Every structure is written in C-alpha cells, then in structure tokens.
Image: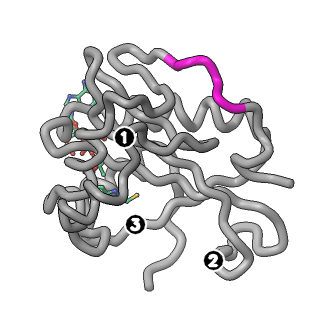
Amino acid sequence: MTGPGSITWPPAPMKTERLLLREPEAGDHAAFIELFTSPEVGTYLGGPRPRDECERALPETPERRPGLFVIGLDGAMIGAIEFNPRDAERRSHVRPDAGETELGYLLLPEAWGHGCAAEACAAALGWFADALPGEPVVLCTRTANDRSMRLAAKLGFAYRRSR
Ligand SMILES: CC(C)(COP(=O)(O)OP(=O)(O)OC[C@H]1O[C@@H](n2cnc3c(N)ncnc32)[C@H](O)[C@@H]1OP(=O)(O)O)[C@@H](O)C(=O)NCCC(=O)NCCS
C-alpha cells in the first residue's frame, strides 16, 4: 500500500523558522470553521461552505488523519496542509499505473502574503519525502488562482496540463 495511509502517524510536531506543523486539536475548531466558510479561501475551491452546516458537521475536536497537518503560528492555527492518496479514477498521467499523492493547502486570508504557505509546504514535503521516498506528489489548482500557482512553482512543481 502506498500513500499517507501506510506511514507511521503522527510524526512529532515539526518546527520551521516561524511555524509549527502538528495534528489538529480541540482548540482548532473555530479556525477550521473560518477556513471552510471564508469566501476568499473558497474562491477557487467551489465557494465557501455555509457556516451552520459547517458548525453541525465539524466535530469539536477536528478530525485527525494521516497526512493532515495544522499550521500553527504563535500558538494559533493559520491553516492546514493535507496529503491525500489518489484513487484509480483520479490518477493523473504522472504515474498512471502506481500510487501518487495529492498535496492541498489552505491558509486563512490574514496569513496570506507572508511566505507562510511556502514555509509550511516545504517542511511538509520534506517530511513526505522522508516518509515515502520516491512517492510522486501532485497538486491540482486552477490557473486563475495566482497565489496558488506562484506557490506551486516556488515549491518546485512542474506545470503539466490545463483543463
Ligand atoms: C494558495 C495560498 C496558500 C497561498 O498563500 P500565500 O500566502 O500567497 O503563499 P506564500 O506563502 O507563497 O506567500 C507568498 C507571498 O508572501 C510574500 N512574503 C512576505 N514575507 C515573506 C517571507 N518572509 N518569505 C517568503 N515570502 C514572503 C511573498 O513576497 C509573496 O507575495 P506575492 O504572492 O504577492 O508575490 C493561499 O492563497 C490560500 O490559502 N488560498 C486558498 C486555498 C487555495 O486556493 N488552495 C489551493 C488549492 S490546494
């Protein structure tokens, strides 16, 4: 089995210059709701989710699962990073006959423009490369999502295809 499901989880919290990558905690509940209901965050992700639906659906302690990191700054959650294994239907042409993992990132708008997404993703990708050496990582983003396109390029992702 490949992908985040086959790794030892959780790793020890990871420190970067400014940030901490860690598992979700009960105190992150409000920040997850902000993330999912923010119109800015949802612009290229199908729109924000309704707040009441989110409040009903999100458990008090946000779900913990392999590959899901909260990004903390000065003790507060500013975003999340996730690695998800791709199933056979969604597999791209990067390695169609084998496993590949998709990277996703979401930061609260007040944390944009400070290089925090790049700093957190670089650390998370380093962890992933150690945990699953050689496993390809892909990411999907709308070409109109300028910030995300710039981030992907900065992280070293090569542009493959426009749909
Ligand atoms: C995509 C997203 C994570 C990018 O966030 P971001 O803050 O723009 O990304 P970065 O961490 O790379 O920061 C880059 C900016 O920080 C600036 N910056 C300021 N201080 C910095 C520092 N110390 N180090 C590096 N960059 C710094 C850079 O100049 C750059 O500005 P620019 O984009 O105007 O040129 C964010 O826009 C987001 O959460 N969007 C909603 C979710 C989404 O669409 N996700 C994509 C699908 S997975």
- What type is the residue that disc 2 sits on? Arg
Residue 3's place in the image compared with 68, above or below, is below
| Residue 60 numbered tag | 1
Residue 133 location in percent, x, y?
A: 78, 39
Give the residue displayed 26% in from the left and 65% down from the top. 53
Q: Is residue 103 above or below residue 23?
A: below
Residue underneath mark 3: 141
How far is the residue under mark 3 from the one under mark 1? 30 Å
Check if mark 3's residue and mark 1's residue have beta carbons within 8 Å. Answer: no
Q: Residue 26 location, x and y as percent? A: 38, 31
Look at the numbered disc 3 and give the secondary structure of its residue: loop
Quadrant field for ligand 1: top left
N-terminal of the pair, mark 3 or mark 2, is 2
Q: CA distance from mark 3 to mark 2?
A: 14 Å
Tell me what residue is drawn at x 83 percent, y 73 percent.
97
Which is the main secondary structure of the residues drawn in magenta?
loop
- In three-dimensional space, the C-alpha distance between marks 1 and 2, rounded to whole angstroms, equals 31 Å
Quarter the C terminus occupies = bottom left
Of callouts 3 and 1, the N-terminal one: 1
Q: Look at label 1 and name its amino acid.
A: Glu
User: Relative to 108, is 136 on the left or the right?
Assistant: right
Precedes in sequence: disc 1 or disc 2: 1
> x, y percentage for residue 17?
38, 14
Q: Is mark 3 within 8 Å of ligand 1?
A: yes
Mark whose residue sits in front, 1 or 2: 1
At horizontal 80% and vertical 45% (from top left) the residue drawn is 6
Task: From the viewer's side, name the closer residue of 143 and 158.
Answer: 143
Instruction: Determine whether, in the image, residue 120 is placed left or right of residue 103.
Output: left
Q: Position of residue 9 (x, y in %)?
A: 69, 32
Residue pointed to by mark 2: 90
**What secondary structure is marked by label 2?**
helix
